[in-house]
Image (cartoon, rainbow, N blue to C red):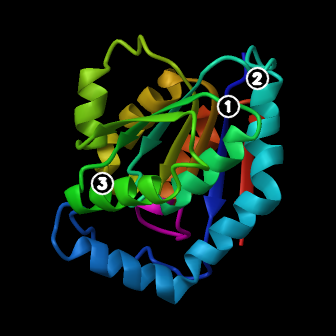
């Protein structure tokens, strides 16, 4: 069974000093957009998806029990936002896996609405992908799936781990790991202190082994 985690540090900006912002706040989408523009983040992520996603994620999934490419790939997006990044990844996955079931866990109703609009705009490219929209937090999703009976071949958490209390990081990230039977992609911002450093040092470096299963991409 293949189970690996890829982590990405996406920008040279040190954001560890920033206060937490409730993702359900009406100001969150605007501030997130401002941060993305300042950090030139999407361009960096899209470059990584174009250059490395197939090697780091898709090709390794092909070597598992889904190698024939005919079975349905089960995908979980945690904190998927407006879907602009997730849709890019789904289109890459579709090149090898024509049938995909994607559960979208996103608490922000505005983000879900934008995600649905994007899917509708790209419905031809996403033919064969079905979506299950869950307007809930990772905490709520975890509670509803405590038995981990459903496994996913690919799990992505894009800038969503910051909204988990530090003391709960270990619990929820282990839950994510338990849901996965393939690959995990966690995108986080850099920082020498705060939740970013805690995530790397106290979970990724210590709990996901062997080390050759942990891939990092720095920008």
Residue annotated with mark 1: 98
The magenta-colored residue range is 188-196
Where, by quadrant of the figure, is residue 95 drawn? top right
* Residue located at (77% from left, 19% from top): 64
| 124 on left or right of 195 | right
Q: Give the main secondary structure, helix, strand or loop, of the magenta stretch.
A: loop
Mark 2 touching mark 1, by CB under 8 A?
yes
Look at the numbered disc 3 and give the secondary structure of its residue. helix
57 is higher (above) or lower (below) than 51: above
Q: Earlier in the sequence, mark 2 or mark 1?
A: 2
Most foreground residue, 196 or 110: 110
* Residue located at (41% from left, 44% from top): 78
Residue annotated with mark 3: 112
Image quarter in which the N terminus is found? top right
- How far across and down, in percent of the image, does residue 182 sit? 65, 26
Most foreground residue, 51 or 174: 51
Residue annotated with mark 2: 69
**Is residue 218 at all visible to an observer of this figure?**
no
Look at the numbered disc 2 and give the secondary structure of its residue. loop
């Amino acid at each position: 069974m293949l189970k690996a985690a890829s982590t990405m540090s996406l920008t040279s900006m040190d954001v560890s000093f920033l206060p937490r912002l409730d993702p359900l706040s009406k100001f969150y989408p605007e501030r997130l957009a401002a941060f993305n523009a300042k950090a030139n983040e999407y361009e960096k992520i899209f470059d990584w998806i174009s250059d490395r996603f197939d090697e780091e994620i898709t090709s390794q999934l092909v070597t598992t029990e889904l190698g024939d490419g005919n079975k349905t790939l089960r995908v979980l997006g945690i904190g998927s936002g407006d879907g602009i990044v997730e849709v890019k990844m789904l289109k890459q996955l579709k090149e090898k896996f024509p049938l995909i079931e994607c559960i979208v866990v996103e608490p922000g109703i505005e983000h879900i609405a934008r995600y649905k609009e994007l899917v509708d705009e790209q419905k031809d490219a996403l033919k064969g992908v079905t979506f299950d929209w869950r307007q809930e937090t990772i905490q709520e999703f975890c509670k509803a799936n405590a038995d981990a009976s459903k496994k996913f071949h690919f799990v992505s958490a894009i800038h969503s781990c910051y909204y988990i209390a530090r003391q709960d990081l270990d619990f929820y990230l282990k839950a994510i790991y338990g849901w996965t039977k393939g690959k995990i992609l966690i995108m986080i911002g850099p920082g020498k202190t705060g939740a970013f450093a805690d995530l790397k040092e106290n979970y990724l470096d210590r709990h996901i082994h062997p080390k050759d299963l942990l891939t990092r991409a720095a920008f």
